[in-house]
């Protein structure tokens, strides 16, 4: 368990920013793995098997507590509004980011991702955030490659449109 | 170029993997289209935010809780005990009833198939039940019934006395 914990936690943190929620998901993953250990026939790697269980567990947990509010300008904090304006005025690439800047960006990112379905969010975070390939995501989730592409496309579009709205309102 | 076209390029793959040709197309289009310029800006910000969130997830996963393993093992034991005790509770509540029913069924089976009474079969029913249903219900035995002579006597005896 010690060996695979980092991997399982990495998957959990993709979905849950809060440490206790991520731990809850990781614990549930290991409990499911213990219960289904007989079904693991050693065909793939143990890590891959656990990653898939972790992904499905996290998706289920998110679906259970499903709340997908649309990101609206009125809900943005002053810091978040400033960040958006600052970044929009900067050239692409986001230069000289200090620690405070990062915290604001991460808060905003979380809120942006909360507006997506768990599946879309996973595809977007892995492909755009972690630079994983479509086939990697397909293998990890058990989805077809075309499904992964569609999910990522849809998530990208939705995230872009949400930010576009915010930029339009802030100007 | 239609506005739709450039947003499709933006949404089709991660911004980081857009090639030089596509980038040149986007830039040239954006120069003359305000809505696409905003879309491009939003796509850049979105990519930046998502990258930031992914970095955060990677960082957080490195900080492990030292008691995590102990916690998981305790939860596993608890779950297993819960499964076992559920079965035990079920047996405790229904065990006596099930045992009694099984014993009764077995006893009845023995009485019916293994040791049937031969006397009971040969004995006529009439002997076993000496009273008719009528006599039991109406409480009228055959002996209590009056004869015709007795009735006539009872009617005409008074007339004879009067004469």
Image (cartoon, grey):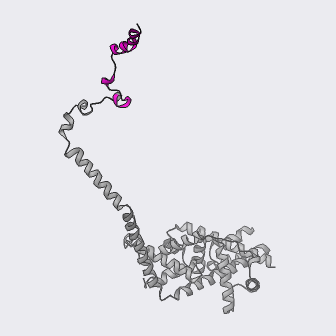
Report the residue at 71% width, 72% height from top: A161
> Is residue B150 in the magenta section?
yes
Q: Quadrant of the N terminus of chain B?
A: bottom right
Residue ID at (65%, 84%): A106
Residue A104: quadrant of the picture: bottom right
Front residue of A115 and A96: A115
Magenta span main SS: helix
**Please, is residue A64 above or below residue B41 in the view?**
above
- Residue B146 part of the magenta-drawn span: yes
Compared across the picture, whether A54 is left or right of B132 comes to right
Query: Which of the 4 image quadrants contains residue B129?
Result: top left
At x 69%, y 74%, the residue is: A160
The C terminus of chain B appears in which quarter of the rendering?
A: top left
- Asked if residue B29 can be seen in this view, the reply is no
Front residue (pair B150, B119) = B150
Q: Position of residue B6 (x, y in %)?
A: 71, 71
Total labels: the figure holds 0
Q: Is residue A97 above or below residue A147?
A: below
Return the residue found at the far top: B163
Residue at 38 percent of width and 70 percent of height: B84
Write the start and end of the magenta stretch as one range: B135-163
Give x and y (percent) for residue B153.
36, 13
Left or right relative to A68: residue B57: left
Which of B1/A33 is in front? A33
x, y percentage for residue B36?
A: 75, 73
Above or below for A91 versus A57: below
Front position in the image: B139 or A150: B139
In the figure, is residue B35 to the left or right of A8? Answer: right
Q: Position of residue B155 (x, y in %)?
A: 40, 13
Q: Is residue A136 visible?
A: yes
């Amino acid at each position: 368990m010690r060996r695979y914990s980092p991997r399982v936690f990495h998957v959990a943190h993709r979905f849950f920013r809060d440490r206790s929620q991520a731990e809850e998901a990781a614990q549930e993953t290991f409990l499911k793995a213990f219960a289904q250990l007989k079904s693991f026939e050693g065909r793939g790697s143990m890590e891959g098997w656990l990653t898939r269980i972790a992904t499905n567990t996290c998706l289920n947990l998110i679906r259970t507590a499903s709340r997908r509010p649309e990101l609206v300008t009125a809900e943005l904090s002053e810091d978040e509004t400033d960040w958006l304006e600052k970044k929009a005025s900067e050239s692409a690439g986001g230069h000289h980011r200090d620690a405070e800047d990062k915290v604001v960006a991460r808060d905003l990112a979380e809120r942006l991702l909360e507006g997506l379905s768990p599946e879309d969010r996973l595809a977007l975070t892995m492909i755009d955030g972690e630079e994983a390939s479509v086939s990697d995501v397909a293998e990890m989730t058990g989805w077809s490659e075309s499904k992964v592409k569609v999910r990522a496309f849809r998530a990208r579009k939705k995230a872009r449109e949400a930010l576009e709205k915010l930029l339009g309102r802030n100007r | 170029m239609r506005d739709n076209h450039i947003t499709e390029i933006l949404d089709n793959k991660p911004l980081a993997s857009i090639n030089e040709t596509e980038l040149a197309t986007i830039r040239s289009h954006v120069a003359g289209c305000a809505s696409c310029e905003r879309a491009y800006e939003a796509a850049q910000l979105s990519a930046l935010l998502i990258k930031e969130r992914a970095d955060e997830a990677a960082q957080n996963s490195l900080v492990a809780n030292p008691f995590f393993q102990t916690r998981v093992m305790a939860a596993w034991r608890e779950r297993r005990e819960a499964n076992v005790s559920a079965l035990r509770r079920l047996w405790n509540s229904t065990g006596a009833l099930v045992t009694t029913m099984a014993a009764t069924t077995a006893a009845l089976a023995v009485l019916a198939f293994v040791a049937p009474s031969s006397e009971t079969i040969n004995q006529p029913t009439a002997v076993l039940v000496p009273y008719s249903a009528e006599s039991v219900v109406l409480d009228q035995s055959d002996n209590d019934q009056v004869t015709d002579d007795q009735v006539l006597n009872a009617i005409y005896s008074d007339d004879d006395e009067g004469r």
